[in-house]
Amino acid sequence: MVLNWLDFSGYLKIFWQFSWLQWIVFSILSNVFLCLFSIGLFQFIEKTCPKQQLQEKSHPVTGSDFYLCLLTVICNSFVMLLGAFLWKINWISLDQSPSGVSVFLETIALILLMDLLMYFFHYAAHQPFIYKKLHARHHEHISTNFLSLFVLHPFETIGFGFMILALLMGYDFSIQSISLYIIINLIWGTIGHLNREFFPTSFDRFFVGTTRFHNQHHLVENKNFGFYTSFWDRVFGTYR
């Protein structure tokens, strides 16, 4: 039987039967693919987007950037494995028969909820002690390159994953909305770390977290902590 895009119950049954070795291989391959997709998307936009660069030069790619990128992939794989474990012990439940409307609303809810949580998480990461220990390495990229999104301390990556898992334990989202959110998050993060504006200037008035919005955060570290939107920065007075 051919499964349509809303009927993932057959795939969930297959995943349920995975051994832990299969889960480890699947999670690593999935996160390697997502990382390579982000790198490819970054390079494609940088080479085809006609808009002027936000900064004169991109940050040079270093060996330590690749090392941290690899650690980020490993940490994301760990979070996926933890999510699978929580699903197997029924701490996370998935809606197996969602409607198109519910998938859309759940995806929007994940974006808005994570935008709020990520604002506070990001703001906390800029407190002096935490910043020095965890987040300063990311901000060495005052201008950005194709690995900047993945140049994170492992605790940052795992903390971001724990926020998602907390939301999934609180509500029965569908695998479709979770997958869409992960794809949107990856694309948004990639676009946010470009060195040229991707969005029209008019998008600022709609509270969209544009490329220039996040680029300003790399230039002025105590401003623009939001990710998907600039809403919370405007509310809490950290908008630039």
Image: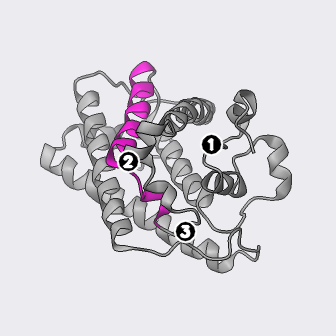
The magenta segment: 147-170
Position in image of residue 48 (x %, y %): 67, 78
- Local crowd at mark 3 within 10 Å, few (<14), some, or many (≥20)? some
Left or right: residue 132 versus residue 121 is left
Quarter of the picture holding the C terminus: top right
> In the image, which is nearer the foreground, mark 3 or mark 1?
1
Identify the residue at horizontal 29%, vertical 56% (top origin).
71
Q: Amino acid at mark 2?
A: Met
Q: CA distance from mark 3 to mark 1?
A: 28 Å
Residue that carries the numbered disc 1 in the rendered image: 222
| CA distance separating discs 2 and 1 | 54 Å
Residue corresponding to mark 3: 41
Residue 167 picture quarter: top left
Identify the residue at horizontal 38%, vertical 31% (top origin): 165
Identity of the amino acid at label 3?
A: Leu
The amino acid type of the residue labelled 1 equals Asn
Give me the disc on residue 179. none
Of the residues under marks 2 and 1, which one precedes in the sequence? Answer: 2
Residue 164 falls within the magenta-colored stretch: yes
**Residue under the image location 63 percent in, 72 percent down:** 45
Identify whether 198 is placed above or below 213.
below
Foreground mark, 2 or 3, reads 3
Kindly identify which residue carries mark 2: 1
* Residue for point 50% across, 72% down: 40
- Of mark 3 and mark 1, the one earlier in the sequence is 3
Total numbered circles:
3
Q: Main secondary structure of the magenta part?
A: helix
List the single residue furthest toward the bottom: 47
Q: Earlier in the sequence, mark 2 or mark 3?
A: 2
